[in-house]
Amino acid sequence: MHSLSAPTRREAVLLILVFVSLLWFSRTGYDTSRVRFWDGTKSGSSTTHPPALVEPWRTRITWSSGRIPNTRVVSHVPGWTIFDNLFVLNGTVFVVTDFPSSIPDRLTITSTAVYIVNGEEAVNSRTPGNREMRVVSTDQAERLFGSSAESIDGVTWLVNDPPQFITHYYHWSAELFFGFWRTYSSLDTTIDEMGKSTLPALRRIFFAHTDADHWRDYALMNQWVLRSAFPSLTTEYSYDWEDRAAMGRPMMLDRVIFTDRAAAMHGHHFLSTGRTASEPSALPGSAYWWSTIRANVIRVCGLDSNVVGDMAQTPVITYISRQEWGRRMLIQEDHERLVEELYKLRDLYGYEVNVVSMDKLSRAEQFTLAARTTIMMGVHGNGLTSLVWMRPSPRATVMEFFFPGGFAMDYEYTTRALGMVHYGFWDNEYFTSPETPGQAYPEGFQGTSIPIDGAVVARLCHERLLLR
């Protein structure tokens, strides 16, 4: 049997060093200050993962007399405002400041959130009052709130709209969500082509006037876009907003992007385009501002945003057909001739040509095809919303077919906002910005006899694809 010998001096010193090291590291916390919305790694590079995040449990903000946090307007255009330290009590929004002249006109921030219809009486019914928003001094705020408020930390998106336009793929992805991200991304003008951003991720959405059953669209695209763009996001709805109001306690939102469609309609960009999402175009921003969202959405489909849609790849032409929809359809003979001309391009030049009905594809197939597409075309309709997943390039083009004399700016504005080129067609005529006509909806606009000259379309496709 062997006897145990006493440790040597060297072993004893090593043991003490190990013990001291364990004590040191056990007291060292994790640095979460560098956690951002985007991990920044590119395809083929080594990936490092942050350790488990340790967050303080901050549930309440307190202050001493005269030291209540002031609300700050970080950024503003009509309908789209970023606030820091925004207060809410009993369902009313409070802006706390001793400099009320620094706050934009309430009419351009919020509204009563009723359904939007035409007419003077309807417009007046949307005008906000003190029930919707109040601007109060620090003294008034302390009398209202006392010495504390519940903390809503991180970044919140407060949607002050009824469900009227939310439950539609275009009005969600290419207007409301589009405008939200254009507003928020104005705080990071260094976003690159791959979408890398230093912005903290969106924590939550408050749908103050929409319940949980009325924000999804019939094609089930809205939730896919939202959940893929912000996987950790939580959502609260009108019943939750009412629950918070019924508590009778003030809450303070660290940072909030406050959006209101009716308020945006007072902006001059809206008056010229009819698009509420056009208002944030006046804010600073990167040319690649949308790339962050595009990259996250298509990555969920297994695509590499570094590669998909690159000009070095074979050009992809996608014709989105509406021939089975029952309205806004091409003359059948013109549809067949268009398909024939596109296939000629495929056979002559090796372009990839897809003729699809979007409703026949799965959601993942729709996102994948759109992300790969160089030229997208079709009659004015919801299917063209997929243009937002295309990769902007000198060749990237959207071609939209209208009944002669008719025009709507929905997809034309969205295309230009992404840095791509849009052409509108009236049979064998086509036009592009700045020579676009005024919006018009003549008889036949919604009909099933829209003419198109397939040969003219194909010729323009080839011209666009010759660009380098």
Image (tube, rainbow, N blue to C red):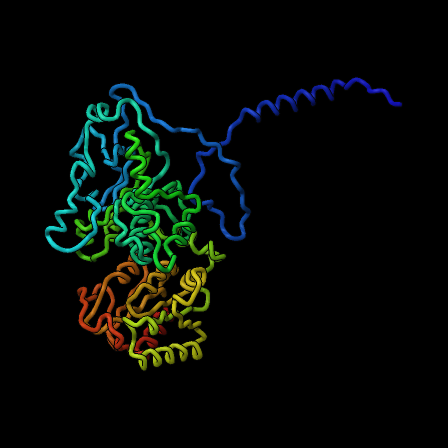
The residue closer to the viewer here, 361 or 371, is: 361
- Provide residue 375's location: percent of width, then percent of height: 37, 67
Where 5 sits versus 151, above or below?
above
Q: Is residue 285 visible?
A: no
Q: Residue at x 33, y 34 (%)?
A: 254
Give the quadrant of the C terminus: bottom left
- Provide residue 235's location: percent of width, then percent of height: 37, 44
Give the quadrant of the N terminus: top right
Q: Is residue 158 left or right of residue 356?
A: left
- Provide residue 193's location: percent of width, then percent of height: 40, 53
Where 309 sits versus 13, above or below?
below
Q: Quadrant of residue 132?
A: top left
Q: Quadrant of residue 199?
A: top left
Q: Residue at x 49, y 57 (%)?
A: 302
Where 395 sits versus 306, above or below?
below
Residue found farthest to the left:
120
Q: Residue at x 44, y 56 (%)?
A: 298
Q: Quadrant of residue 405?
A: bottom left
